[in-house]
Amino acid sequence: MAEGFGERLRRAVTDRGALCVGLDPSPEVLGAFEREDTLEGVQYVALALLDAATDAASCVKPQVAFYERFGSRGYAVLERVMSEARAAGLLVIADAKRGDIGSSNEGYAESWLSDASPLASDALTVSPYLGVDSLSPFVTRTTTGRGLFVLCATSNPEGRALQGARTAEGVRVFDDVLSTVARWNADATILGNIGVVLGASAPRGDFPLRELRGPVLVPGVGAQGGGLDQVRRLTEGVERSSVVVSLSRGLVGEGASPRSLRATMSRWRDAIAENL
Amino acid sequence: MAEGFGERLRRAVTDRGALCVGLDPSPEVLGAFEREDTLEGVQYVALALLDAATDAASCVKPQVAFYERFGSRGYAVLERVMSEARAAGLLVIADAKRGDIGSSNEGYAESWLSDASPLASDALTVSPYLGVDSLSPFVTRTTTGRGLFVLCATSNPEGRALQGARTAEGVRVFDDVLSTVARWNADATILGNIGVVLGASAPRGDFPLRELRGPVLVPGVGAQGGGLDQVRRLTEGVERSSVVVSLSRGLVGEGASPRSLRATMSRWRDAIAENL
C-alpha cells in the first residue's frame, strides 16, 4: 500500500515548513506581474510563483478557476504546472472544491486522485453541500496515497449562516463536517488522509480539532485579513506538522520580481514556524 | 441588453418541451453503448445523446466530471459537445456545481458565463456552501443573457442534514437559498435568470416556490427513483414553462441505439407534458 497522504504531508511540513503557496494567476495577480491577462500570462505567472515556492514551501495550491477561464488550453497549462510542481518535490493541493453525488463524484475522484489522470494531484479540496457522506467516493480513492481537504468553516462572512446552521440533532454544520472527517481518519496510526479547510478567522465550534487526526489547511492569512496569531489559537493542541498555512495574494502584494517573491515567501515560512 | 436567460428558457420549454437530457458519458453509460471507457468513447456517446436529444429536448446538461476525467483533452471534447448543442438550438446547462469566494468565483463566472470563453454555456449549476451571497460574482455575469441554477434541496438522503439545518434565524438552509434567489429575481418582469436545483424527492420547506420568479431544474427523475407525480406536487403553482426536468441514466437503460434513444426521449418529453 502506498504511503498515506497524511504521512507524506507530515514529512513535507517537517522538512520544508508549513507554507502553502497559492498558484493563482488571477487578473489581479497578472497585473502585479505586469502581464496581460492571456493564457501565456497565466503560464508565465504560475511558473514564476512555482519557481519561487520551490525553496520556501512544502505545498502549492493552484486555484483551478484561474486556469479554467481559458478552457481546455487553460487546463493544459494547469497540467503542466502541477506536473512541474510534483517534479520539484512539492505537494500539489488542487483547489477545485468539487462536490456532487454518486457517479459524478466518482468521475471527479478519477479526475483528480487517480494515477492515470493528467490532473492527478496529491490532494483535492471538496465541498459538502450535497452531504458530507456524499463525498465517500473521494474517500475511497485516498488509499492510493492521495488526500482530501473538505470545506468546513471559512473566513468569509457570507459563509457563516450556512456553515453555522444547526442540524436536527442540534449540531453545527461545520462541527458535523469535522466529526465525519474524524470518523474517516479513525484508523490512521498518526495522521489520516482526510483533512479540512478552516479559515483563519472562522468561528470556533464544539468539535475538538485535536481529535480530527487529519491535516488542516488554513487559508485566509494575509490578504484576506487573518493573522498568524489567529491560526495559532485555531490550531491549539493540534500536532504542528499537520497544519498547512496557505497564502496567495498576500505574497504578491510586496512585489512580483523573482527575488522579492523568494524573500517574501521565506519570510512567511519563517514567521509561520515561529508563531504556530 | 441581451434577452434574459429566464425568457430564453421559457421560450425553449414552450416550443420544445421541458425535457433536459443529461450528456453524461460515465463508465456505466459508455458500457450501455458498448463503448470502451476512452476519450473517443466519451465523445461518441456524448454526441450520440446530443443527436437523439435534438428532437425531444429543450436543454442538455453535460455533467462536467465525466469529461474532466480526461483532463485538458476531455475539456476539448466538452467544448465541442457544448458548441454543437448550441448550434442545434438547445440550451446548454453546464453541470459543474462551482462555488468559491471572491476572485475565484469571478474566474469561474468568466469560465462558464462569458461570451469569450470556450466553455461558455447558457447556464451553470453553482453550490452555496461558502454562503449563497458569495455567489454574487456569478449573478453579476447573468446580465449577458446567461443564467444560474443554485443547488438548493437535493434528492440524495445524505444531503438532508446539511440542507435542512436551521440558521441562527431558524430558517432552513435550503429555504434561505430559495429566498435569496427570489431576491435576485425580484426585478424580473416575468421570469428571472437565477434558478434553483430541486430534487424530485427532496423535502418541502416553508418558502413558496411560486414566489421564486426563477427557473426550477428538477433532476432525480427515473434512475434516481423520483417520479413525475412528485415533480408535479413539488412545482404546484409554479408557472409551467419555468420548470425543466432532467434525465440521464434513466434514458439509457432502455437501450442505447439511436432509434431507441429517440423513442425513449420523446416518450419522456410527452409524459412530462402530460403530468406536470
Image (cartoon, coloured by chain):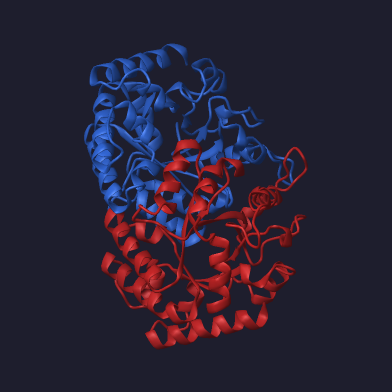
Chain colours: A blue, B red
Left or right, A150 with reference to B34 = right
Left or right, B188 with reference to B54 = right
**Residue at the image point whose x is 70% and y is 67% from the top:** B238
Q: Position of residue A36 (x, y in %)?
A: 28, 36
Q: Position of residue A171 (x, y in %)?
A: 70, 40
Q: Residue furthest top?
A: A274
B236, A172: nearer the viewer: B236
A84 shown above or below B61: above
> Taking the image as drawn, is residue A152 in sight?
yes
B236, A218: nearer the viewer: B236
A274 shown above or below B84: above
**Residue at the image point whose x is 56% and y is 73% from the top:** B13
B34, B201: nearer the viewer: B201
Q: Position of residue B38 (x, y in %)?
A: 28, 66
Left or right, A255 with reference to A208 = left
Left or right, A146 with reference to B56 = left
> Taking the image as drawn, is residue B131 in sight?
no
The quarter in which the C terminus of chain B is drawn is bottom right
A248 shown above or below A40: above
Total tally of numbered discs in the picture:
0
Q: Position of residue B183 (x, y in %)?
A: 68, 49
**Residue at the image point whose x is 57% and y is 18% from the top:** A233
B102, A233: nearer the viewer: B102
Residue B119 in which image quadrant: bottom left
